[in-house]
Image: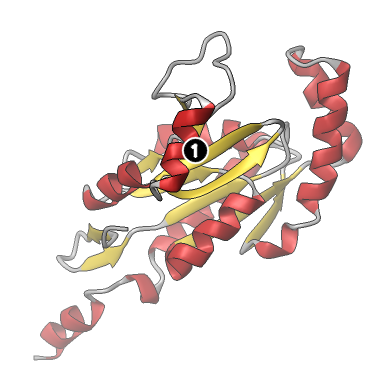
């Protein structure tokens, strides 16, 4: 990966944040991700590649990079992904080159990925990764939200609920865990986490030089 360095208003540098949002399907992470992007122009979304079919209203390169299985396998073989996973009979992965480009432009990068992807990304980028897991207020509420979408069959909803239980079991692999019982409140908490993580001393790579100038 490229060195994730960003400018600071005071003239020194900081490392970019690789900000991960994960949750079971229906718990609200995509809504929160959209609100974050709309509120912060220094944050950019990592667009995943997937082998699943495009859904109505989606656009290639905006919602996902839609590729066939042969192309996805080639990308895996050529080490073009930061992380990838097999979910619900389809494959999803994070292309490395666009993330490097966004970091090079001085932007933090937002990832909407599952626990497997979060783990792989953390193994690769370590301290630059901030992992936030969003929980539903209850499993009954989660199922209600999934059914309220009216986009999935009963069989698919049952599979999503089964997978949700498995995903929740990995909550302790995250730096922050929030319960999304109110979308606006949860969004504010996520935004506060991002702002605080940007200010961590370990990310202020030019801080020592700045302090030395103050002391001279």
Q: Is residue 42 visible?
A: no
- The residue lying toward the viewer, choosing from 134 and 129, is 129
Q: Residue at x 77, y 12 (%)?
A: 150
Given the current orientation, which residue lies at the most extreme right position?
140
Query: Coloured how?
Result: secondary structure
- The residue lying toward the viewer, choosing from 95 and 164, is 95
Does dot 1 land on a helix, a strand or a loop? helix
> How many numbered discs?
1
- The residue lying toward the viewer, choosing from 126 and 130, is 126
Which residue is denoted by mark 1 in the rendering?
Answer: 73
| Image location (x, y in percent) of residue 167 | 76, 48
User: In the picture shown, does residue 57 fall above or below 22?
Assistant: above
Q: Residue at x 27, y 74 (%)?
A: 205
The image quadrant where one finds the N terminus is bottom left
Q: Residue at x 85, y 35 (%)?
A: 161
Q: Is residue 170 left or right of residue 91?
A: right
Q: Residue at x 52, y 37 (%)?
A: 33
Q: Quadrant of residue 51?
A: top right
User: In the picture shown, does residue 140 fall above or below 9?
Assistant: above
User: In the picture shown, does residue 99 fall above or below 141?
Assistant: below
| Image location (x, y in percent) of residue 38 | 42, 32
């Amino acid at each position: 990966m490229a060195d994730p360095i960003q400018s600071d208003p005071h003239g020194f540098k900081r490392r970019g944040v690789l900000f991960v949002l994960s949750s079971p399907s229906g718990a609200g992470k995509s809504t929160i991700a959209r609100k974050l992007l709309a509120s912060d122009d220094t944050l950019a979304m990592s667009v995943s590649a997937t082998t699943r079919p495009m859904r109505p209203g989606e656009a290639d390169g905006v919602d996902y990079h839609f590729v066939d299985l042969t192309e996805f396998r080639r990308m895996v073989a050529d080490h073009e992904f930061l992380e990838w996973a097999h979910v619900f009979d389809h494959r999803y992965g994070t292309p490395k080159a666009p993330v490097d480009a966004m970091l090079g432009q001085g932007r933090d990068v937002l990832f909407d990925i599952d626990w497997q992807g979060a783990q792989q990304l953390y193994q690769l980028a370590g301290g630059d990764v901030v992992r936030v897991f969003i929980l539903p207020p209850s499993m009954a509420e989660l199922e209600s939200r999934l059914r309220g979408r009216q986009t999935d069959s009963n069989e698919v909803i049952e599979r999503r609920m089964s997978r949700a239980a498995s995903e929740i079991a990995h909550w302790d692999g995250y730096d922050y865990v929030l319960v999304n019982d109110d979308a606006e409140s949860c969004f504010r908490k996520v935004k506060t986490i991002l702002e605080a993580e940007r200010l961590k001393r370990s990310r202020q790579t030019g801080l020592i030089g700045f302090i030395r100038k103050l002391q001279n």
